[in-house]
Amino acid sequence: MSALAARETIDFLVLGGGVAGLSFALEAAGRGSVLVLTKRVRSEGSTQYAQGGIASVLGPDDDFQKHVDDTLVAGAGLCHRDAVEVTVREGPERIRWLLSLGVEFDRQGGELHLTREGGHSRRRVAHAKDTTGREVERALLAACDARGVRILEDQVAVDLVSSAKAGLPGPNRILGAYVLDRASGEISTVLAGQTVLATGGAGKVYLYTSNPDVATGDGVAMAWRAGAAVANMEFFQFHPTCLFHPLAKSFLISEALRGEGGILRNRAGEAFMSRYDPRKELAPRDIVARSIDAEMKRRGDESAFLDMTHLPKPFLLEHFPNIYATCREYGVDMAVQPIPVVPAAHYLCGGVVTDLDGQTSVPGLVAIGEVSCTGLHGANRLASNSLLEGLVFGHRAALRAAPAPRGAEAARVPDWNPGNALDPDEGVVVAQNWEEVRRLMWNYVGIVRTGKRLTRAHTRLELLRREIREYYWQYKVTPDLVELRNLADVAMLIVECARRRKESRGLHYTLDYPKPDDREPHDTVIAPGELA
């Protein structure tokens, strides 16, 4: 039996149970009824796997302007200053809020222990060892349970309910979502005064990623299909250092290791970052990832190596216990041998366009966290600004949240109609297309791009999306099919944005236009209805 009724009505429907979604849910709970839906177990998402920490102005040698400046530099000229100012200035209060919920950050001499990561001019990253996200997720879920926030697991949003698609009069607005129960296969109609996308990123659109399996770009794809504007999808951040091992899946080697003195070396043992940037290992992520990629291609190496062996073993065990233990599981003792690392898709800096309160271009639809494009990250996210963004904008969106009046139009929204859809008979079709989307994105739309590669990707994606649409409408919906459809749509949005940007900037580097064009820095916005 489905955990949801066939038809439900709620004030605030939150899709996603990470830092952004749970922050919103906690603060909106006093303003109306809240329902949080997660695709798998409620803790599964990118927040859970965040290692480094949360950047905020917390030290005596730091100030707001320094954090703002570091964010602007990392963003390569495309950050929206108002979004940066809001995030930085509201950050310390969000950290205090987490402390009030019982988050146990590391301390030194009674004060928060702060570390430093690439792109930061000061130590300002609050952390809980090297499992910060896990600790934050634990505390937020405990607070939601104490507050009585309803959280349902294994619920897959199929699509948003829009008034336009429902045939209702007036301007288009979002009225909720159709939701598939993973266990029963039933699809419920969940109507909401406000629908909040907190679905995270889209790393699974690439063959190699640090992201968990749930990161399939669902929120961006659903919002775009429902008529919301999206922007800057070409700026996909590749984390410079993921563990390179045939049995390791998506294990991140935190930037904090480089912040504490880690040295990148090639297979010959040479420290190579000085050839690429004077900041060496502490350069912003886009530069470090491109440098590793270039060094691997120059030498023909399968990986680079992060050397921590010059640091005392007790220090490594104290500050990076999870990374140390996981590397040991794969036969690497980071105290005595360098860690083999490669770049992998990590973070989507674009997304659904919002204002500073999370409001999208479609009434009734809110987007917060990685799924959104607030302008904070510009062309490249500064390390440890991601959890901060989820906290700040989850809070801001909740302050503006007000349950919409429920009128007669809710009764006119049709339930999901499978029509004459058949039971899926060829799972291999979904698996094949899934693999093809991810491989072509890795090969053609990766760290270094060209116009020819993007055109090839675009041509193949058009065919793949047509095949997926035909399959989608012919057969009954499954979670895998929902995710495949979303992945293909997000891939097309990334490719289209990349084709429109005739320069190299931040995370978007093309051999056809290797320099930035500073005459008129601009966002790449795909307006509703521009692409089929």
Image (cartoon, rainbow, N blue to C red):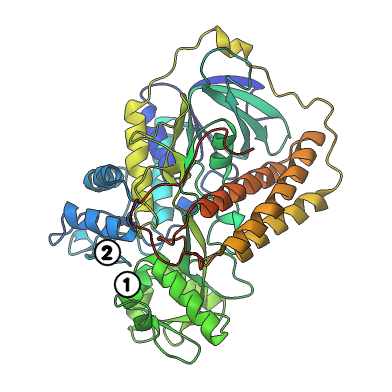
Evaluate if marks 1 and 2 touch, with contact meaning CB atoms under 8 Å apart. yes
Name the mark on residue 282. 1
Q: Residues within 10 Å of mark 2 (few under 14, many from 20)?
A: many
Residue, far top: 408
Q: Quadrant of the C terminus?
A: top right
Closer to the camera in the image, 19 or 170: 170
Name the kind of residue labelled 1 in the image. Answer: Leu
**Which is more N-terminal, label 2 or label 1?**
2
Examine the rendering and report whether any part of residue 318 can be seen.
Answer: no
Residue drawn at 47 percent across, 24 percent down = 364
Q: Residue at x 48, y 27 (%)?
A: 362
Indicate whether 511 appears above or below 299: above
Q: Secondary structure at mark 1?
A: helix
- Reading the image, the residue beneath label 2 is 120
Horizontal and vertical percent position of residue 247: 63, 72
The reply to whether residue 412 is visible in this rendering is: yes
* Rendered image: mark on residue 408: none
Q: Residue 79: x percent and y percent?
A: 33, 50
What residue is shown at x 59% (from left), y 70% (from top)?
248
Q: Nearer the viewer, residue 379 or 435?
A: 379
Does 462 sit left or right of 69 as displayed?
right
Q: Quadrant of the N terminus?
A: top right
Q: Which of these two is toward me, 448 or 428?
A: 448
In this orientation, which residue lies closer to the viewer: 440 or 487? 440
